[in-house]
Image (cartoon, helix red, strand yellow):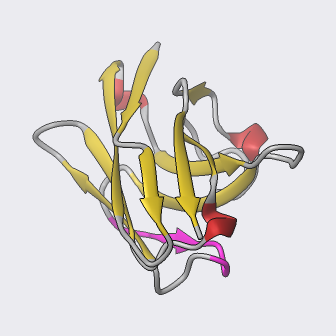
Amino acid sequence: QVQLVESGGGLVQAGGSLRLSCAASGRTASIYRMGWFRQAPGKEREFVTAIRWSGDNIYYADSVKGRFTISRDNAKNTVYLQMSSLEPEDTAVYYCAAKPSLRGIYYERSAYEYWGQGTQVTVSS
Protein backbone atom coordinates (compact mmCIF):
# COMPACT_ATOMS: atom_id res chain seq x y z
CA GLN A 1 0.00 0.00 0.00
CA VAL A 2 1.03 3.56 -0.68
CA GLN A 3 -0.38 6.54 1.17
CA LEU A 4 -0.42 9.99 -0.42
CA VAL A 5 -1.06 13.27 1.39
CA GLU A 6 -1.37 16.54 -0.52
CA SER A 7 -0.92 20.00 0.92
CA GLY A 8 -0.40 23.56 -0.21
CA GLY A 9 -3.72 24.47 -1.79
CA GLY A 10 -5.44 27.75 -1.15
CA LEU A 11 -6.83 30.95 -2.61
CA VAL A 12 -4.67 33.04 -4.90
CA GLN A 13 -5.25 35.91 -7.31
CA ALA A 14 -4.88 35.46 -11.03
CA GLY A 15 -1.24 35.71 -12.01
CA GLY A 16 -0.08 34.39 -8.66
CA SER A 17 1.73 31.22 -7.68
CA LEU A 18 1.21 28.24 -5.42
CA ARG A 19 3.24 25.14 -4.64
CA LEU A 20 1.50 21.87 -3.92
CA SER A 21 3.20 19.00 -2.14
CA CYS A 22 2.42 15.30 -2.17
CA ALA A 23 4.11 13.19 0.49
CA ALA A 24 4.25 9.47 -0.20
CA SER A 25 4.63 6.79 2.47
CA GLY A 26 4.32 3.05 2.72
CA ARG A 27 5.60 0.89 -0.14
CA THR A 28 7.18 3.75 -2.07
CA ALA A 29 9.66 1.36 -3.66
CA SER A 30 6.74 0.00 -5.69
CA ILE A 31 5.98 3.36 -7.31
CA TYR A 32 6.86 3.72 -10.97
CA ARG A 33 5.34 7.12 -11.71
CA MET A 34 3.62 9.97 -9.86
CA GLY A 35 0.99 12.19 -11.41
CA TRP A 36 -1.09 15.25 -10.65
CA PHE A 37 -4.69 15.46 -11.81
CA ARG A 38 -7.34 18.09 -11.19
CA GLN A 39 -11.10 18.21 -11.15
CA ALA A 40 -13.11 21.38 -11.57
CA PRO A 41 -16.78 21.55 -10.53
CA GLY A 42 -18.96 19.73 -13.03
CA LYS A 43 -16.01 18.45 -15.03
CA GLU A 44 -14.11 15.22 -15.41
CA ARG A 45 -10.86 14.71 -13.55
CA GLU A 46 -8.09 15.61 -15.97
CA PHE A 47 -4.39 14.96 -16.27
CA VAL A 48 -2.05 17.80 -15.34
CA THR A 49 1.48 16.41 -15.17
CA ALA A 50 3.46 13.27 -14.37
CA ILE A 51 7.00 12.33 -13.42
CA ARG A 52 8.76 9.01 -13.17
CA TRP A 53 9.66 8.12 -9.58
CA SER A 54 13.32 8.30 -10.60
CA GLY A 55 12.76 12.01 -11.31
CA ASP A 56 12.93 11.99 -15.09
CA ASN A 57 10.51 11.39 -17.94
CA ILE A 58 8.19 14.33 -17.30
CA TYR A 59 4.95 15.13 -19.11
CA TYR A 60 2.60 18.12 -18.97
CA ALA A 61 -0.89 18.82 -20.25
CA ASP A 62 -0.86 21.50 -22.94
CA SER A 63 -3.01 23.74 -20.75
CA VAL A 64 -0.30 24.04 -18.07
CA LYS A 65 2.89 23.72 -20.11
CA GLY A 66 5.24 26.59 -19.39
CA ARG A 67 3.37 27.58 -16.22
CA PHE A 68 3.52 24.48 -14.01
CA THR A 69 6.59 22.50 -12.96
CA ILE A 70 6.66 19.07 -11.36
CA SER A 71 9.62 17.90 -9.30
CA ARG A 72 10.46 15.43 -6.57
CA ASP A 73 12.64 15.23 -3.49
CA ASN A 74 14.15 11.77 -3.15
CA ALA A 75 15.02 12.18 0.51
CA LYS A 76 11.51 13.24 1.49
CA ASN A 77 9.54 10.96 -0.85
CA THR A 78 7.67 14.07 -1.88
CA VAL A 79 6.50 15.33 -5.24
CA TYR A 80 5.89 19.03 -5.81
CA LEU A 81 3.76 20.96 -8.24
CA GLN A 82 4.91 24.54 -8.67
CA MET A 83 2.13 26.55 -10.29
CA SER A 84 2.79 30.01 -11.70
CA SER A 85 0.81 32.51 -13.77
CA LEU A 86 -2.34 30.97 -12.36
CA GLU A 87 -5.61 31.59 -14.16
CA PRO A 88 -9.21 31.30 -12.92
CA GLU A 89 -9.50 28.26 -15.21
CA ASP A 90 -6.95 26.49 -12.98
CA THR A 91 -9.47 26.45 -10.12
CA ALA A 92 -10.03 22.82 -9.14
CA VAL A 93 -9.33 20.16 -6.58
CA TYR A 94 -5.84 18.87 -7.26
CA TYR A 95 -5.03 15.22 -6.65
CA CYS A 96 -1.74 13.42 -6.65
CA ALA A 97 -1.62 9.80 -7.69
CA ALA A 98 0.85 6.94 -7.78
CA LYS A 99 1.26 4.45 -10.59
CA PRO A 100 2.89 1.27 -9.41
CA SER A 101 3.54 -0.45 -12.72
CA LEU A 102 4.33 0.02 -16.37
CA ARG A 103 0.75 -0.82 -17.30
CA GLY A 104 -1.36 2.04 -18.62
CA ILE A 105 -0.49 5.42 -20.03
CA TYR A 106 0.75 8.29 -17.88
CA TYR A 107 -2.26 10.52 -18.63
CA GLU A 108 -4.93 7.89 -17.93
CA ARG A 109 -6.64 8.00 -14.55
CA SER A 110 -7.12 4.24 -14.65
CA ALA A 111 -3.36 3.71 -14.75
CA TYR A 112 -2.96 5.11 -11.22
CA GLU A 113 -3.70 2.87 -8.27
CA TYR A 114 -3.22 5.19 -5.31
CA TRP A 115 -4.74 8.64 -4.82
CA GLY A 116 -4.47 11.41 -2.29
CA GLN A 117 -7.44 13.13 -0.72
CA GLY A 118 -7.12 16.24 -2.89
CA THR A 119 -6.38 19.86 -2.13
CA GLN A 120 -8.46 22.83 -3.28
CA VAL A 121 -6.90 25.51 -5.45
CA THR A 122 -9.00 28.60 -6.10
CA VAL A 123 -7.81 31.35 -8.43
CA SER A 124 -9.74 34.60 -8.27
CA SER A 125 -9.95 37.01 -11.18
In screen coordinates, is 111 left or right of 1? right
Q: Which residue shows up at 30% across the image and 55% down it? A: 54
Q: Which residue shows up at 63% across the image and 67% down it? A: 88
Q: Is residue 76 visible?
A: yes
Q: Nearer the viewer, residue 34 or 89?
A: 89
Residue 61 on the magenta span: yes
The C terminus is located in which quarter?
bottom right
What percent of the width, then of the height, locates residue 97? Answer: 54, 38
Q: Which residue shows up at 34% across the image and 42% down it? A: 8
Q: Is residue 105 visible?
A: no
Up the image or down, 15 lies above or below 39; here it is below
Q: Nearer the viewer, residue 23 or 26?
A: 23
Furthest toward the left, the residue is 75
In screen coordinates, is 62 left or right of 115? right
Up the image or down, 29 lies above or below 45; here it is above
Magenta segment range?
56-63
Residue 20 on the magenta span: no
What percent of the width, then of the height, locates residue 71? Answer: 30, 61
